[in-house]
Amino acid sequence: MTATVPTHEQIALIGAGPSGLAGARNLQKHGIPFQGFEAHSDVGGLWDIDNPRSTVYHSAHLISSKRTTEFTEFPMPDTVADYPSHRELRRYFSDFATRFGLREHYRFGTRVLRVEPTSDAPDTTWQVSVGPADGDGEEGVETFEFKGVVIANGTLSEPKHPRFDGHFEGELLHTSDYKHAEIFKGKRVLIVGAGNSGCDIAVDAVHYAKCVDISVRRGYYFVPKYVFGKPADTLGGKKPLPPWLKQRLDAKVLQWFTGDPTRFGFPKPDYRMYESHPIVNSLILHHIGHGDIAVRADVERLAGHTVYFKDGGTRDYDLILTATGYALHYPFIDRALLDWQGMAPRLYLNIFSPRFENLAVLGMIEASGIGWQGRYEQAELVARYLRAQAAGSPKAAALRTAAKGPPPDLSGGYRYLQLERMAYYVHKDTYRAAVRAASAALADPS
């Protein structure tokens, strides 16, 4: 724990991945005593492939470019690739933690088991129970009282397993189980789901598998990683376009570069561009066009090694890999305490509890191009709020009033699909402007 500061005057910070490190850096920078907890033995979260909870695989790279993803105060070296691998990113987060002395604030190998308020009061303190990451039961469990809690344990570690009618006699895995394409060697493979991970892994599989099919339920927009020789997400004017115009223009540019994916067997999207997360992959259509991957309809049922598809087709497989995403997972805290409604917690700016003054979440956000700097700005807002609150500033009270609602519209005018993975999706520019404005309102006068 922070030397000489009792825990009931500290903030408990959960997680040492990108969002947790952003939280640690900003709490440190703003002089707020805190104690970090991380179940793994080092920083990096899912980008450390040796972390038992990591869901990255050996071929994993960023789908956004380094310059739109990095922390502004800690740029990636020029020697790092445009789209860094998990190895480069593990090193990046390690170097970030070293540069700012963040490891000393963490207890590693320590899993958070329970987070509970000590009362129903808005300004309640919190009991946090922790134990050894490899422990079982109550042995070695310690409980501390903290002033507040910042949750930053990530959003991509709890796999969503689909339910299929029937029974499959081959291997049935989730992308969270996948590490290397050797598992596909000589096998007939079906990938279920064409999200970014599903497409990446399908491309991996063509080099090992006997055959590779990809099953899809809806159409997708495929964005190449490079446009006009530059990372696609670095292009575009500085002045945001109206949603209808950006959707129309970018969809037209995509047609120039990728053509019409429906000719490969993909359904036509029943939504406009950016109303769901695009697929950033330059190789999936290449391999489909070369016959290395076949597009199949949605799965209807399984029987032995046979998969029956909803369009009436059938095929036999040895291995099915479900690329069906991840669920928000905060197992140590009761959902009601996070005001969980429907598919996700309802938090002000996707951060602040409307009920409790000292409870916040970092990283519960998805947006095209938000980067880690967007999460850093979340953390800066939380740190400024906690500092203003400790000082009894009316600025903190103003944020608390705003947090009670009604919530701001963070869609930027886009009509996002009503899917679980889109339940906490926001428009990057609209969201960052709202967070920056709230943070500026809490800044000390210069």
Image (cartoon, rainbow, N blue to C red):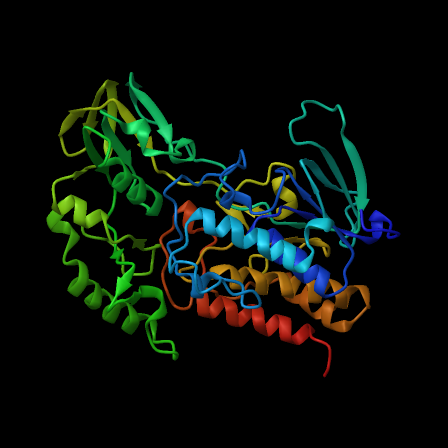
Q: How many marks?
A: 0
Q: Residue furthest right?
A: 4
- At 58% across and 68% down in the image, what residue appears? 73
**Quarter of the image holding residue 400?**
bottom right
Q: Is residue 15 visible?
A: yes
Q: Position of residue 336 (x, y in %)?
A: 63, 43
**Quarter of the image holding residue 385?**
bottom right
Report the front residue among 21 and 81. Answer: 81
Report the front residue among 63 and 417. Answer: 63
**Quarter of the image holding residue 153?**
top right
Q: Position of residue 272 (x, y in %)?
A: 27, 60
Q: Position of residue 209 (x, y in %)?
A: 22, 30
The answer to whether 172 is drawn above or below residue 118 in the figure is: above
Q: Is residue 277 left or right of residue 48?
A: left
- At 18% across and 58% down in the image, what residue appears? 258
- At 41% across and 62% down in the image, what residue appears? 369
Q: Position of residue 259 (x, y in %)?
A: 14, 58
The answer to whether 35 is drawn above or below residue 209 in the figure is: below
Q: Is residue 314 left or right of residue 274?
A: left
If the image is split into quadrants, where does the C terminus sit? bottom right
Report the front residue among 227 and 161. Answer: 227
Q: Is residue 214 left or right of residue 327?
A: left
- At 39% across and 58% down in the image, what residue appears? 81
Report the front residue among 100 and 360. Answer: 100
Q: Is residue 12 visible?
A: no
Q: Residue furthest bottom?
A: 446
